[in-house]
Amino acid sequence: MFNLSTIKALDLGDVTSSLPEDDAPTYNAGTTYNIADLVIDDHYVYGCLVDGTVGKKPSDFSSRFQTPQYWQLRGPTNAYAAFDNVLSVPSVNTSGDMTFTIESLSNISSVGIFDAIGVTATAQFHNSDDDLIDTQSVNLTGFDLSSHYNWLFTQPTAGNTNYLFRRFPANSVKVVVTIAGDATELGELTINQIGYVIGDALYGSSVRISSRAKYDDDEFGVPSYVYKPSRINGTFEIFGERDFIETLWGRLRKLSGRRVVYEADEGRTVTTGIGLVRDITVPIDLPGGYKFSIETEGVQ
């Protein structure tokens, strides 16, 4: 089964994190800031570039095209790093669980967690009366230690670092996602919409992770080994019902170049991820339907 869905832009006003947002003081319009001062503005950290800066909201005065540029964006706060669209900048808790609450859900096909580190991940869905109406959980560790027997005779299981929570009640308006463990991380949490289950992923579909680490010269001309984000390429051969694909084909083509979530085999980490749709081939007409391929590319 191959599932493809687009990522919904979140209003961070609808997101609550259990992690403290204490990376820096909150920006105050009446405070005078000097070079190297750090502040938080709308869940992002900014560094001051001009002595005597006052009344210049960082999110409005951080463009490098402004003269002067009063602030420099340093990145998201740890509490909201899982919502910055960058997998390699995770939210981290070195001493326990992390929980994210997202409200005002509508027209959602799935909730995705990516680059999750911990023991378990749980999604709890609530209705408009704040009643808990569905709970889904997935193992992250690759081991089942749920009983004394399993503790003594542990059998490895398919732990998930990437996972999609799907098939939850349509009247869900809030989800609470918890990554549980002694030390936890979450690269990205996505709310996905316009989900398409477009056919069966055929044998031969693959996800390839390529290292981009290489030697680069530093500012003094000295070569050093520099780690670059890994590139993840996926090529998925798909077979779909002819009538269904014909109604969907135009919409699929519009996804080219867009950032999407894909799941080529439900519940398996290796074929679940985030990427840009690079190409969708012209279908091959077979007696039972259409065979075609989708290529995705993501950078972590």
Image (tube, grey):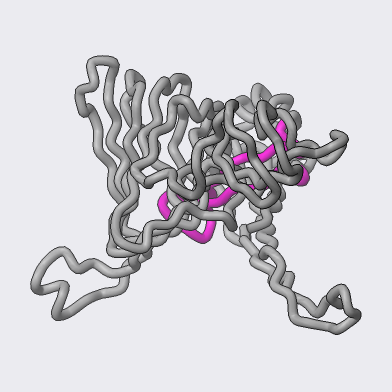
Residue 199 visible from this viewpoint: no
Q: Quadrant of residue 76?
A: top right
Q: Residue furthest right?
A: 221
For image coordinates 57% across by 35% down, the residue present is: 41
Instruction: Name the residue at 87% across, 73% down.
Output: 219
Does the stretch in magenta take in 193? no
Which one is in front, 274 or 206? Answer: 274
User: Height in image: 18 above or below 129?
Assistant: below
- Do we see residue 208 in this rendering? yes
Answer above or below: position of 111 versus 119. Answer: above
Position above or below: 103 against 143: above
Percent position (x, y) of residue 132?
21, 28
Residue at 59% across, 47% down: 38
Q: How many marks?
A: 0
Quadrant housing residue 154: bottom left
In depth, the one of 9 and 107 nearer the eye is: 9
Q: Position of residue 155 (x, y in %)?
A: 25, 74
Q: Position of residue 60 (x, y in %)?
A: 71, 28
Q: Which region of the structure is painted magenta?
A: 255-279
